[in-house]
């Protein structure tokens, strides 16, 4: 099996939208009302919204492919594109989503390693992310990778306020 990671471009917009909706539904649909899911998906993964994010020079998307099929993606944000004001020495991992049929193959590890590598290359001191408080598998994964809880913030799924843990990894340069 061949695994590759490549930066997304505007030509990838429709695939990015499809994979975003698919993976978000797979992960969160069982825990949220149909109305709140629809409201969130329509807003967050609207083609115009994704185009705006892809065009932002401080945000980057990367597809991970297995045997030439898109298996998931990573979204990172720097500087003013971060969803919380964490400073110029931080890089945000806003999304890591892997399609269900590709889970448990180590792809998430490849993506978090990619994000940490980018942060190191850019001289960032911290990598941070928000993860839903009830997503135990993701929390365990990030903790295994050296992330520690440093805060919480509200996340709105439609009209439902939910809590995300803010997890941070401080980078050590050798």
Image (cartoon, rainbow, N blue to C red):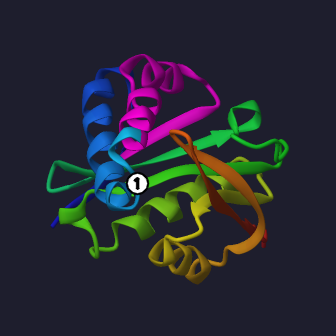
Mark 1 secondary-structure assignment? loop
Please state which of residues 109 and 40 is positioned toward the viewer in this rendering.
40
Please state which of residues 15 and 32 is positioned toward the viewer in this rendering.
32
Q: Which residue is mark 1?
A: 32
Q: Is residue 82 left or right of residue 114?
A: right
48 vs 80: above or below: above
- Report the quarter where the N terminus lies: bottom left
Bin the neighbour count of mark 1 within 10 Å (Cα to Cα): few under 14, some 14-19, many 20 and up.
some
Residue 19 placement: quadrant: top left
- Residue under the image location 47 percent in, 22 percent down: 49
Q: Is residue 85 left or right of residue 160?
A: right
- Residue under the image location 68 percent in, 33 percent down: 81
Q: Is residue 115 left or right of residue 92?
A: left
- Residue under the image location 46 percent in, 32 percent down: 44
**Residue 58 falls within the magenta-colored stretch:** yes
- Report the quarter where the C terminus lies: bottom right
Q: Name the main secondary structure of what is drawn in magenta.
A: helix
- Residue under the image location 45 percent in, 77 percent down: 137
Please state which of residues 108 and 139 is positioned toward the viewer in this rendering.
139
**x and y percentages locating residue 168 in the rendered image:** 73, 66
**Residue 3 falls within the magenta-colored stretch:** no
Residue range in magenta is 36-63
141 vs 11: above or below: below
Looking at the image, how many numbered discs can be counted on the residues? 1
**x and y percentages locating residue 53 in the rendered image:** 52, 26
- The reply to whether residue 5 is in sight is no
**x and y percentages locating residue 144 in the rendered image:** 57, 83
- The reply to whether residue 131 is in sight is yes
**x and y percentages locating residue 16 in the rendered image:** 32, 35
51 vs 132: above or below: above
């Amino acid at each position: 099996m061949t695994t590759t990671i490549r930066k997304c471009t505007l030509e990838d917009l429709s695939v990015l939208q499809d994979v975003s909706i698919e993976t978000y539904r797979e992960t969160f649909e069982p825990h949220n009302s149909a109305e709140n899911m629809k409201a969130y998906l329509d807003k967050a993964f609207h083609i115009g919204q994704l185009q705006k994010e892809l065009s932002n020079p401080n945000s980057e998307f990367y597809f991970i492919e297995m045997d030439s099929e898109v298996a998931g993606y990573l979204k990172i944000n720097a500087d003013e594109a971060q969803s919380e004001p964490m400073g110029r020495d931080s890089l945000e991992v806003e999304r890591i989503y892997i399609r269900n049929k590709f889970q448990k193959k180590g792809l998430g590890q490849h993506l978090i390693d990619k994000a940490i590598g980018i942060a190191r290359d850019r001289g960032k001191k911290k990598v941070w992310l928000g993860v839903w408080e009830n997503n135990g598998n993701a929390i365990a994964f990030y903790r295994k990778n050296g992330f520690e809880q440093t805060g919480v913030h509200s996340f709105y799924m439609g009209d439902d306020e939910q809590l995300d843990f803010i997890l941070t990894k401080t980078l050590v340069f050798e």
